[in-house]
Amino acid sequence: MSEQIFIAVAKVEEVAPDTVKVVEVGGRSILLCNTKDRIFAVENQCSHAEEPLACGRIRNGWIACPAHGARFDLETGEAMNPPAKDPIVVFPVRLTGETIEIAV
Ligand code: FES
């Protein structure tokens, strides 16, 4: 089993509570989301029509797609309501001091 490799992507202070920050890692656009006193990392792409999620509202552990309103659980990626059915991609996050690291 290969070990996950974590990459530093931002400082905690760059992602204020209830906001998101877009980072590019290995050619992928990834959203860091600060909600529920945690940082989550998800792919910046909705599973419905592949629109970016970056301008979506986040609250209480979910993000809403700005295109058609599907909401996704930021921990599991699961779709919480239509029109999306499939999950979005989520990435493991860890904090090292004030640095946010993710495994892609
Ligand atoms: S593209 Fe996100 S709900 Fe349609």
Image (spheres, helix red, strand yellow):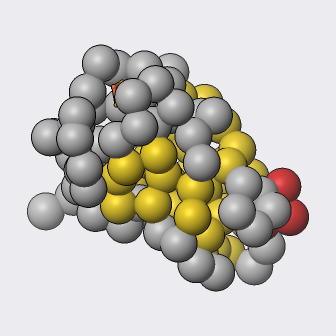
Give the residue displayed 45% in from the left and 60% down from the top.
Answer: 62
Which residue is depicted at the point 25% across and 50% down? Answer: 81
Quadrant assignment, res 22: top right
Quarter of the figure with residue 69: top left
Residue at 37 percent of width and 49 percent of height: 71
Residue displayed at 70% across by 62% down:
18
Q: In x, y percent, where is residue 84?
A: 22, 37
Quarter holding the N terminus is bottom left
Which quarter shows the C terminus? top left
Query: Does residue 69 show up?
Result: yes
Quadrant hosting ligand 1: top left
Q: Is residue 31 above or below residue 93?
A: above
Q: Residue furthest right?
A: 13
Question: In the image, residue 55 lies at what x, y percent?
Answer: 63, 34
Residue 4 is at least partly visible in this image: no
Which is nearer the eye, 60 or 91? Answer: 60
